[in-house]
Image: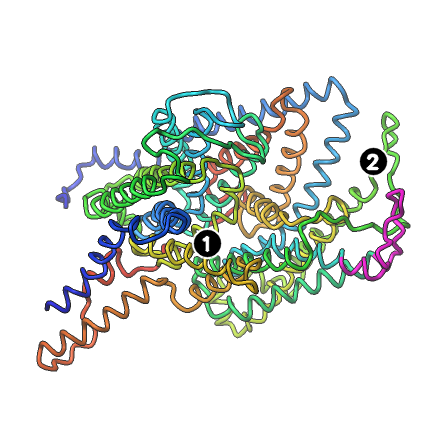
Amino acid sequence: MQNISTASPDSDLALRRRLFAVPPGTLALRALVAAALVFGVAWVAYKASQDLRVFVIVGLNGLTLAGLYFVVASGFTLIFGLMRVVNMAHGSLYMLAGFFAFDLQERLTGGEATSAFGSSEAGVGDWVIPLVVASLAVGVIGLVMQQLFLRWNQGQELRQALITIAISVIIADQALAHFGGIAQELAPPSVFPDSVQLHVYGLSYPFFRIFVLLAAIAVGLVLWAVIQRTRYGMIVRAGVDDRHMVSALGINIQLVFAGAFFVGAFLAGLGGVLGGTMISVDKGNDTQYLLIALIVVIIGGMGSLGGAALGALALGLVDSFGDVYLPEGYTNYSVLLIFGMLVLVLAVRPLGLFGRPA
Amino acid sequence: MTLDRGIRWGPGLFTVLILALAPLIFSDFYLSAVITKALWLGIAAVSLIFLAGYVGMVSLGQVALYGIAGFTAANLVVADGGSKVALNPWLATLLGLGAAVAVGLFLGAIASRSYGIYFLMITLAFSVLVYFFFAQVTQLSGFGGVNNVELPSVVGNPLQQPARLFYIALVVSAAVYVSLRYIARAPLGLAFQGVRDDPARMRALGYNVPLLRTVAFGLGALVAGLAGVLSVWWNTRISPGSISLSQTIDVLVIAVIGGLYRLEGAWVGAVVVTVLDNWLRGIDLVGNRFNTVIGVIFLAIVLVSPGGLMGIWGSATGALQSRFERAAAGGDPDPLPFTEERHPAGDTTIVP
């Protein structure tokens, strides 16, 4: 123990300076981040100037991926923001919904959703029914998980994370047993055109990917409207800030938690069906989409919807531009770009771009 | 009092005796497939337990760090796949450990400002990124991994001479255990525990909390790196599958089964999991669904006893001890004698 000495005015001033000064290295860090950002944009602009057609297509790929990532991550961030539960089974729920929907579509169409030429022969119902049923089913699984295992462990964050990890292990193994280890693709409704004309450089682009982007925007708007404009949303917002106070005001916070967990899991399921149609559904998807949800919310800030949108946009764009615009022979290093982005964000804002301390 | 000491030291002495004679007791297969494997898995798990129990950092990045050590070492020696560099195996091992520590310190510097569940998520994201990195970068690994890795001559051929690798793993395990216990009681370790219990107060006392957490993470990376190198020697290969999320979860399961608060729990958990693994795979009904069984066991332990098996052991011996002490004191009603032995790492929950 050091002695507490009485501070003279001089040392008091020095102490104050030390206390209120920007921590050393912060400015350098900010400069580094700004430089990285400028360099990234400049590099993309330089590459784009060489071939604008590639730029348009890759950019759209990034945007549509970002849409899918947002749908998945918004559920994750909703659950975390309200309950401080890190749902490690979020990716598993995503994968499960994809498999459920595929299975259901097979049954509905008798295994003939896709013609021999690869074009879809599924009716609107053959796609919409699996979408709704699988998402709802996964929402219910999430709800059951929360009620059975998480509800009575509130506040024990680590224990809850471990519980969801254990559940993800079980789901992964059971999914492998029931659905096999083969990548499956859902057929979109045949009324959807295969591609749309972009009217720039005579390019066309897969219609379903645009649809996913629009769906993601719709999900975002609905979530925003519900959270900002309704009574339920008001309770959720209050719960994010201080759940004990909300509970003390006579609101049944357990009901709110249950509802939020259902919606969060439902969104994972929605993402799974959209992703299963847009890309595919595979046994490794649980890890992959858990990672995506984690990165999106670490970048955007836990519990923030706007942060999730920004994080998804950043990840989607870096993901798709990294694969194409890295120097020849190094495109397989694109993971490092994502890691670099994560490191830079955390270095400047440990709680993410829109994160607030709990 | 002798009984009391028996409870305290008996299991340890018995374990040392069994382990020293293990190559005589067990078949070559069992020695290699269960015991040696449990030893290196235990080292991986103890790096997690040390960070979680003594520094309050529950890291899911330990498997990635051991992967970095393993992949670096495997890439720098003669092997199928990976880079074409061919260094001396010992030098490669040292460089592998160095790489793990360097990456650990770097990541620690970034992540050490985040606490609790945020820290867990950041390290998990890092871990999965490392997996995808090695899966994608064919120059260093690719999905096939690095095979037929050249080992130091002292290891010999782990298939034909399993006893050699066993003793190496045993010595490394013992060294890791003794060192971590020593560090835990040294001023540095006490500072770690202070950081675990109350970072704000430690800061007020003049400690550099982020630096301490970074150093701890680097130390954990070194221990994880040792496990990574041993795993390469044991497998004679390493692939992205060796550091996938399921391996991260396996190490976490081991740590949780062993108890997140006691160092020796790492090896207890590792033995339980490898023995279970070996035994369950033989049962037809379970054989293919091994992971479901492990998941259910994991879930049950997390739900029932957060302290894991060592926690159960601790409460059992604690209850026994308190009975002896009550009897010795002539029926003095002393309901809960708090012995340091029961909670060496402190009876605290992990910093939220």
Q: Looking at the picture, tell me which residue is in the foreground, A128 or B219.
A: B219
Q: Which dot marks residue A205? A: 2
Chain hosting mark 2: A
Residue A130 position by quadrant: bottom right
> Image point 40% across, 36% down: which residue?
B233
Amino acid under label 1?
Ala
Q: Secondary structure beneath disc 1?
A: loop
Amino acid under label 2?
Tyr
Q: Looking at the picture, tell me which residue is in the foreground, A94 or B204.
A: A94
The quarter of the rendered structure image containing the C terminus of chain B is: bottom left
The number of numbered badges drawn on the structure is 2
> Image point 55% across, 70% down: which residue?
A147
Magenta part of the protein: which range? A103-126
In the image, taking residue B5 as reference, residue A106 lies left or right, namely right
Q: Where in the figure is residue B241, as x and y percent of width and height?
A: 53, 42
Q: Where in the figure is residue B314, as x and y percent of width and height?
A: 27, 65
The quarter of the rendered structure image containing the N terminus of chain B is: bottom left
Kindly identify which residue carries mark 1: A358
Pointer 2 local density, CA inside 10 Å: few below 14, some 14–19, many at least 20: some
Q: Where in the figure is residue A320, as x and y percent of width and height?
A: 67, 33
Q: Is residue B57 visible?
A: no
| Placement of B70 over or under A275, stated as above or below | above
Chain hosting mark 1: A
Q: Where in the figure is residue B304, as x and y percent of width and height?
A: 41, 69
| Placement of A316 over or under A55, stated as above or below | below
A151 part of magenta stretch: no
Render colour scheme: rainbow
